[in-house]
Image (tube, rainbow, N blue to C red):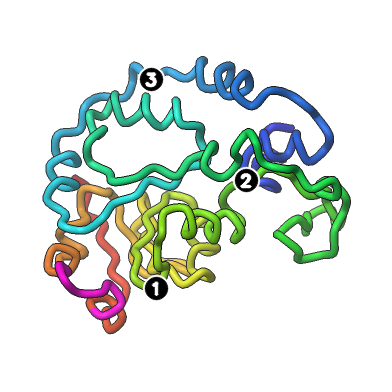
Amino acid sequence: MSAQLYRNYGTTMAGLRAFGYDFDHDDYHSFVHGRLPYEYLKPDPALRSLLHSLPIRKVIFSNANEAHVAEVLHRLELEDCFDDVICFESLNPKNQTINPNARKSSVIGDDHDHDSECGVVLPKSPIVCKPFENAFQQAFKIAKINPHTTLFFDDSIRNIQTSKLTGLTTVLVGSSQRKIGVDYALESIHNMREALPELWESVGKSLDVGLSQKIAVETPVEA
């Protein structure tokens, strides 16, 4: 059930809320993330150096809650490598007004809530999260981001393909194979400088100027 809700709604929590389950979001995150083996995450000095050397603004966009993002950054020793964080609380503030029609069924294709495998229309979720376009649009407003001059890195092909529709230039991390919606494919995030040297030359330039004429790059080299 968890996997099916994740597939249909982006997160299991969003799926549970769509079907009417009511619970405290902080309690849910504390339970789910509290069971994760954070001890397996180790400092990544190579990535830290790479991010610090990148002369452009860097923003994290995560479906996870603030505490989880902070813990992961702490374990990797990357806390001071980013300029802003867009997370669960950013997109789903506690004082927001929930649309009373949020869990009603909607038309096919609206907010990606149609399950093509079983042929049914699913109820909407009041939770805003990737991979849905409204989450990206909301993140752009909060972080004051112009998607047409922004590069988006993610390891989820669903997130990548939706982000491409919003105007972002996309980088799929963890694969050397390009798919629909993927501009660049990196086997490892540590290959970023070799695959995208123009990022380090983009000071004072718009990314769309530096990247729009580039063909997509595949880099199977592992760091």
Cα distance between the residues tagged 1 and 2: 24 Å
Disc nearer the start of the sequence (1/3): 3
Identify residue for label 3.
38
Residue name at image x 47 percent, y 53 percent: 142
Range shown magenta: 202-209
10 Å crowding of disc 2: few (<14), some (14-19), many (20+): many
| Residue 203 falls inside the magenta stretch | yes
**157 left or right of 49?**
right
Q: Looking at the rendered structure, which numbered label has been put on residue 148?
A: 1
In the rendered image, residue 32, in percent from the top left (x then y), is placed at 57, 21
Residue type beneath disc 1: His
Q: What residue type is labelled 3?
A: Tyr
Q: Is residue 2 magenta?
A: no
The spot of residue 121 in percent (x, y) is 85, 55
Whichever of labels 2 and 3 marks the residue nearer the N terminus, that label is: 2
**Residue type highlighted by circle 2:** Gly
Give the number of the disc on residue 167.
none
- The main secondary structure of the magenta stretch is loop
| Residue 98 or residue 106, whichever sits in front | 98
The answer for how far apart the CA atoms under marks 1 and 3 are is 35 Å
The residue depicted at 87 percent of the width and 53 percent of the height is 105
Q: Name the residue under label 2.
A: 10
Dot 3 alpha-carbon crowd within 10 angstroms: few under 14, some 14 to 19, many 20 or more: few
Question: In the image, 169: left or right of 134?
Answer: left
- Of discs 1 and 2, which sits in the foreground? 1
Q: Would you call the spot at circle 1 few (<14 residues within 10 Å), some (14-19), or many (20 or more)? A: some
The residue at 56%/45% (across/down) is 91
In the picture, which quadrant includes the C terminus?
Answer: top left
Pointer 1 or 2: first along the chain: 2
